[in-house]
Amino acid sequence: MAVTFPDGGHHDGFCAPAALEPVRVFVNTLDLDAGTDGLTDPDGLVEALRGTVGLAAEAVPTAADVQAARALRDALRALLACNHDGGTPDPSAVRVLNATAADADLGVRFAPEGWSVVACGVPGVLGAFGRLLAVVAAAQADGTWTRLKICPADDCGWAFYDVSRNRSRRWCSMEVCGNRAKVRAYRDR
């Protein structure tokens, strides 16, 4: 069942803080409601990466990069799904994240001033993947990561940032996904 929000699209009133927003946008390249996937070909990958963490003009993604991007997105979605209840992600998702981090030479680097940052050591598509994972690491360190969640509605799965004071928001839209779940539960009783 397709869901149409009053503004004609997904409600983005729950954008993540600027530093974490690239991850939310990247994860939302898969739109279950609309039945679209922004990572179906190299051009879509270029658009997704340039619109989030940047991608050098000379970078030319391959079909293998597209598959790696989809695996990375799925692994990030698995991590986000755990932010509702504190569950443990599927071990295969963790393996994908670790392999991507290793391929991107992701690690701690120190600036001349002595401050540390998580950075990647390779350019191109792998470097962009590394920058996404660096954002995740920084968000986990600063406590904002657990507020980025996946809507649990089977036909939605939209990533949203939980702005509630007690971090208890469950649905991307209470008016649409939350309401449908409550009506379904009522009918089941």
Image (spheres, rainbow, N blue to C red):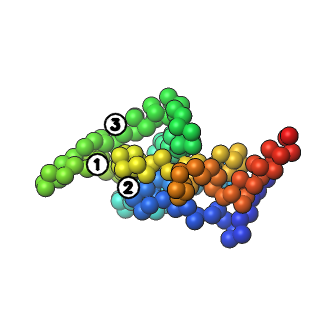
State left or right for residue 38 relative to residue 115.
Answer: right
Residues packed near mark 3 inside 10 Å, few (<14), some (14 to 19) or many (20 plus)? some
| Mark 2 or mark 3, earlier in chain | 2
Residue 134, percent from left and from top: 35, 48
**Left or right relative to 129: residue 148:** right
Q: Amino acid at mark 2?
A: Ala
| Image spot of residue 99 (x, y percent) | 40, 34
Residue 105: which quarter of the image?
Answer: top left
Pick the front one: 29 or 144: 144
Q: What's the CA distance linking mark 1 and mark 3?
A: 12 Å
From the top left corner, tell me how far across and down residue 119 is, in percent: 28, 48
Q: CA distance from mark 2 to mark 3?
A: 20 Å
Under circle 2, the secondary element is loop
Q: Which mark is residue 59?
A: 2
The residue lying at 35 percent from left, 46 percent from top is 141
Q: Which residue is mark 1?
A: 119
- Which secondary structure, mark 1? strand
Q: Earlier in the sequence, mark 1 or mark 2?
A: 2
Q: Is residue 174 visible?
A: yes
Residue 129 shows in the view: no
Write the residue at 68% across / 71% down.
Answer: 7
Residue position for label 3: 102
Q: Secondary structure at mark 3?
A: helix
The foreground one among 38 and 184 is 184
Q: Earlier in the sequence, mark 1 or mark 3?
A: 3
